[in-house]
Amino acid sequence: MHHDTPEQLQEKARQLVAEYVSKVDDLKPKERTKIPSQDMPAQDPEVRVHNLDEVALGYTFEQAQVEAIRCLQCVKKTCVEDCPVRIDIPGFINHIAHGNLDQAAGVIKEASLLPAICGRVCPQETQCQQNCAVGKALKDVEKSVAIGRLERFVADWERKTGKISIPEVKPATGKKVAVVGSGPAGLVVAADCRREGHHVTIFEAFHKLGGVLRYGIPEFRLPNDIIDKEIQTLTAMGVEFKTNFVVGKTRKLKDLMEKDGYDAVFIGVGAGLPIFMGIEGENLVGVFSANEYLTRANLMRAFDKGHADTPIYQSRKVAVLGGGNVAMDSARMAKRLGAENVYVVYRRTEVEMPARKEEVEHAKEEGIEFLFLQNAKRILGSEDGRVKAMECVRFELGEPDASGRRRPIQVLDSEFMLDVDTVIVAIGNGSNPLLTQSTPGINLNKWGNITVDENQKTSMDRVFAGGDIVLGAATVILAMGEGRRAAAAINKMLAEEIEKEKTVIN
Amino acid sequence: MAKILLKKQLSKDVFMMNLYAPLIAEERSAGQFIILQVDEDYGERIPLTIADANIEDGSITIIFQVVGKSTLQLSKMNEGDDIPALVGPLGRPTHVENFGTVVCVGGGIGVAPMHPIAQALKAAGNNVIIIIGARNKDLIILEEEMKAIADELIICTDDGSYGRKALVTQPLKEICERSPKPNMVIAIGPPIMMKFCSETTRPYEVFTQVSLNTIMVDGTGMCGGCRVNVGKEVKFVCVDGPEFDGHKVDFDNMMTRLNSYKSIERESHNCYLQSEIEAKEMK
Ligand SMILES: Cc1cc2nc3c(=O)[nH]c(=O)nc-3n(C[C@H](O)[C@H](O)[C@H](O)COP(=O)(O)OP(=O)(O)OC[C@H]3O[C@@H](n4cnc5c(N)ncnc54)[C@H](O)[C@@H]3O)c2cc1C
Ligand code: SF4
């Protein structure tokens, strides 16, 4: 696969800007769709497999402007309809086309609090970019307006130029909100409730903040700086943080409300217990959950072998089971930690893979090998209990099932051996039991996820929940969206109470 | 952050510390553990059982043995220093009730986590027999504390330098042969000791509980590094344990898994020692 270098991309963009920028408001749709879509500049694959720096480098201003000019400013905004938090997409893109980045940032911020993060990790090809008119006209989703990259561009510009403004905080109300978990859901609730003047405390079990953004998604896809910046903003707003605090263990949820005076609680504890395949050999040395592998590498910084005390397994040949973002991240991390061969073993085909398209492309460029329509059957160990091989079996696609997807069917006698010393299981997570175990009175569904109403309220009075603990493993943007909804409900509840208290006093 | 209120060396490699952690002191029950880090950015997360707690002064007691780089660093910290990260109490508390006669077997450093459990069992009205085992006299810890709790205290050393020259399984077997046999056994110590205690009690059908110290990263059920085979099931020590039915635990697999990083850790430990030596030489 050939890619232009960042310099070549920039040169082409400069020429296009010169050609189009003067007539930005006068172009016909036909003319706009003819403008070539802008590729994301990226680190050279050969170089980046030896470092942890971010792979996608981000658009230059010129590239962003060209890409923005491609937008048709549709009347029926399918992109907005497909955005879980309804960002005014053509609105902010139009500002970029006119070079007004400040205003573009303002438009995004109205709907999304974490654009630098979402621009990087949202599955745009199944959301805003899926039904974009440009992509439809060109009959290629990959040619849709690159909304995610533009969002990222604006957010990065704002951060780099030091223009991030601290949202205004209303005068103190005297009400206290406890937020459990510092993942995207929790961060959003904290910001939204703090703005209304409530005292907000985030309780986080780990020693670092950010949830999956920190310990799961690797540095090469989402640099820690960005998460730090979001946290700094919250700190500047006066949000209080308590790390190393497991609600349900260090203190019961009930006690936070009854003894510590919190008027409302938001539970955003994320997904929990990793799921294993339940096959022979899964407890051998060298078999990891993706959570463990990535946590060691990211949070405990095991990639930094000179400094870190937490060891990471030295692998030569790695099999990763699964086809989502977690699988891609694990595979690419293994490569960066020095593995020679990394295989992603997936039961279905590439089309069904839930991972973001860009990550799959990047993984391929980095030499990750994909074994589609195959699955693990058992893991074999050596005498000293370490992984020495994995037996796989092949599948073929059968008749479509109720969901319309063709079901993979095992091919008889198709077993074969894969020579590996490490197996990383990335097939999903169950629900997090820590808080719910010690909180009788909170209703769960049969998978252990907290059940909520349309305002994210749980079965417990004053207790709300959102994100992966409600949805099962979902996405950053859905977690954020739930956080927003919960914060609105909490703010409304507290405002009504304050109103009532006033009337009583009067 | 948790301040070190008190530090004592109990034997050559074993240290005791009281840490200021009022919330944990209040919430903890016997059998639970904490996780601490000596360095928030690069440090390992070290799980340690809470050996005791004092609600009045808000302190918890930990007892640890220097086994690698992280515990060595911890042992070098002093009273007044802050431990940057401390979280807990984690794990499920020991189930305590009046079972009748309970035998508590503590091997080596395992005596430390046994202490609060024995205490709780005594308080619940049990007849508590305590067996303490160690390689030699110098490695015996908490003898006085245990004596204060025990209805019967048996001390064994491998080399006979103190108490009986025996492995803990010998007195355990004798007690199982008594009539009536004990109602329950709890064994905490090196995996191999817990394995053989379980094998000792199996023919007598005495329920035997063991407390596992597997590899852990988060200790909150997120990583699954601590998984063990218990009967036909896979259990997570940090959320389902740390205590399990010793007759069902697959100790051999657990011991292999505990050794996952042996060679790598030794390297990190050696590097650290090496740099310590160099630093000293430079002075
Ligand atoms: C490797 C990986 C890659 C991913 N890639 C993508 C991607 O590219 N795009 C995308 O949209 N989504 C991705 N996801 C999914 C996305 O990260 C999650 O959907 C999202 O982070 C969920 O947010 P959350 O706020 O619900 O919880 P989390 O981010 O899981 O945060 C929960 C936090 O709560 C803390 N906590 C748990 N229990 C307690 C307790 N009792 N007390 C205090 N704190 C507690 C946890 O330590 C954690 O920090 C990925 C996930 C993983 C694991
Ligand atoms: S659908 Fe595409 S072209 Fe239409 S407004 Fe949205 S981004 Fe622009």
Image (cartoon, grey):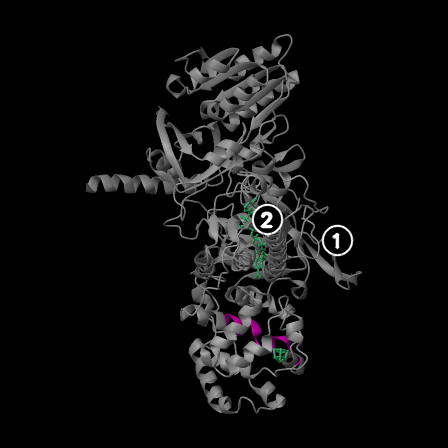
Placement of A14 over or under A55, stated as above or below: below
Q: Say which element carries label 2.
A: strand
| Part of the protein shown in magenta | A139-153
The amino acid at mark 2 is Val
Residue A421 appearing in the image: no
The answer to whether mark 1 is within 8 Å of ligand 1 is no
Quadrant that contains the C terminus of chain B: top left
Q: Residue at x 49, y 46 (%)?
A: A206
Q: Chain of mark 2?
A: A
Residue nearer the viewer, B55 or A493: A493
Left or right: where does residue B277 sit relative to residue A40? left
Q: Is residue B113 left or right of residue A345?
A: left
Q: Is residue A73 magenta?
A: no
Chain for mark 1?
A
Q: Nearer the viewer, residue B246 or A118?
A: A118
- Asked whether B67 or B203 is in front, the reply is B67
Which label belongs to residue A265? 2
Q: Are marks 1 and 2 on the same chain?
A: yes
Task: Quote the CA–CA distance across marks 1 and 2.
Answer: 53 Å
Q: Position of residue A276 (x, y in %)?
A: 63, 46
Mark 1 vs mark 2: in front: 2
Q: Position of residue A94 (x, y in %)?
A: 55, 81
**Residue A412, labelled with which disc?**
1
Q: Earlier in the sequence, mark 1 or mark 2?
A: 2
Q: Residues within 10 Å of mark 1 (few under 14, many from 20)?
A: few
How many numbered circles are shown? 2
Residue A395, horizontal then vertical, whole percent:
71, 57
| Circle 2 crowding by C-alpha within 10 Å: few under 14, some 14–19, many from 20 | many
- Residue B233 visible within the image: yes
Taking the magenta stretch, the answer to whether it contains residue A152 is: yes
